[in-house]
Image (tube, helix red, strand yellow):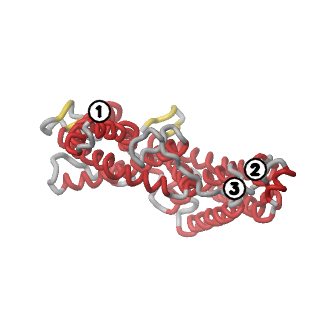
Amino acid sequence: MAVEARERGGAPAHARAARAPLGLGLALCAAYYVASIASVLALAFLATADDFEYDVTLVRVLAQSAIATVGLWLLWRRAAIFPRYGVVSGACLLALLAIDLWIGEGVGGESTLLTGPAALLGAAAFASATLAVMLYLALSSRVRAVCAQVLGRGSVKADPGSEGYYFERPLSWHWWRNLGIYYAASSLIGHWGEICFCWLIVLGVFQGSYDFSHDQLWSWWLYPYPAEGIAAVLCVVVLYPLKQWLARRFGGRILPTLVVSFLATMAVCATIDFCAGILFNADYHLWDYRALPFNFMGQIVLQNTLVYSVIATFVVWVLYPWVAGLLKKANQTAVDAFFFAFMGAYVVLMPLYFLTVTPSGIVIG
């Protein structure tokens, strides 16, 4: 019966749905999601890090961008789950907005550029648009006809020429997607790692100085550290393949492979740390290693390079293969959804903390 229907229609029903035009209603839903992301990004560009407290407002802002990004992806895929996702996610956003209005300071209080009637008007407009989208997705038969694609698990094909189970096929969608996850996650985890390292300095385990008034490190917990993200990417695209190549060259012997791999890792870590210092710490306002032994221009020091290299070696030899293996075995649709949600929130943090639009121009940092 299914074969006969496919022959009469020329293509399966889900394939025809994937090519079906959105229509006015779904196009307006897409515009709603785009406007949601644009409004959050505009706020992130116009606000400064000091404008945002770590409260329900920030959660709402990040959730709005993440939910809208996933919604656009599901709509683009014509996913059958999209109508239910739109209704449930819309209800979550309305609940967050209500909580923000009830227990927060207005629509964000000090965390927003809009106050008083303007803030309430913006909240009312957003709530009305969200309700309209929810009702349309819940009641429209057109939505169910167009969004009929059942998203499966998907699969990840390893590179036939690669050594080892964990190295994803380079330049494939899954490879780029995972690389984005590694970068964004590592830039945040790296920040928290810097906090732990500073506490070890406080406890006297390592040499160095610390400043508890430094908000970027101690107070802005979601401040991304791009250097750590870049280091994670290099672990995947440079250091892991190098480790595999060295293992072949040394006939699978672990000790020489580990030693040479560690030395190469030290060179990469020192280069990243030094470049970050030259670009962002030229006046030594973030760190200053000139008083420590074995430093170079006060931007890098042997102690820190060794610590970073040990961590990077653990990533290359243990953590990356384990995480990549988990991602490969996981439901690929779920990983895709996580990627779009995570990146939807992450792109808000970058302009919030690194770029600010002012009447005199764009301020970096």
Callout 3 secondary element: loop
3 vs 1, front mark: 3
Q: Are marks 3 and 2 in contact (CB under 8 Å)?
A: no
Q: First in sequence: mark 1 or mark 2? A: 2
Q: Position of residue 318 (x, y in %)?
A: 32, 52
Residue flagged by tag 2: what amino acid is it? Answer: Ala
Q: Based on the displayed image, in which of its 4 quarters is residue 71 positioned?
A: bottom right
Amino acid residing under circle 3: Ala
Q: Which residue is mark 3?
A: 79
Residue at the spot 68% in from the left edge and 57% down from the top edge: 126
Circle nearer the N terminus (3, 1): 3
In this view of the protein, which residue sits in the foreground, 104 or 155? 155
Mark number, residue 15: 2
Q: Position of residue 43 (x, y in %)?
A: 56, 47
Q: CA distance from mark 3 to mark 2?
A: 11 Å
Q: Which residue was labeled with disc 1?
A: 271
Q: Residues within 10 Å of mark 2 (few under 14, many from 20)?
A: few
Earlier residue among tags 3 and 2: 2
In the image: residue 99, left or right of residue 232? right
Q: Name the residue at 30% across, 45% down.
A: 312
User: Which amino acid does the dot numbered 1 rest on?
Assistant: Thr
Q: From where the camera sits, is residue 59 visible?
A: yes
**At 72% across and 57% down in the image, what residue appears?**
129
Question: Residue 306, how many percent across, how many down?
Answer: 21, 43
Q: Quadrant of the N terminus?
A: bottom right
Taking the spot 28% from the left edge, 45% from the top edge, the residue there is 313
Q: CA distance from mark 1 to mark 2?
A: 50 Å
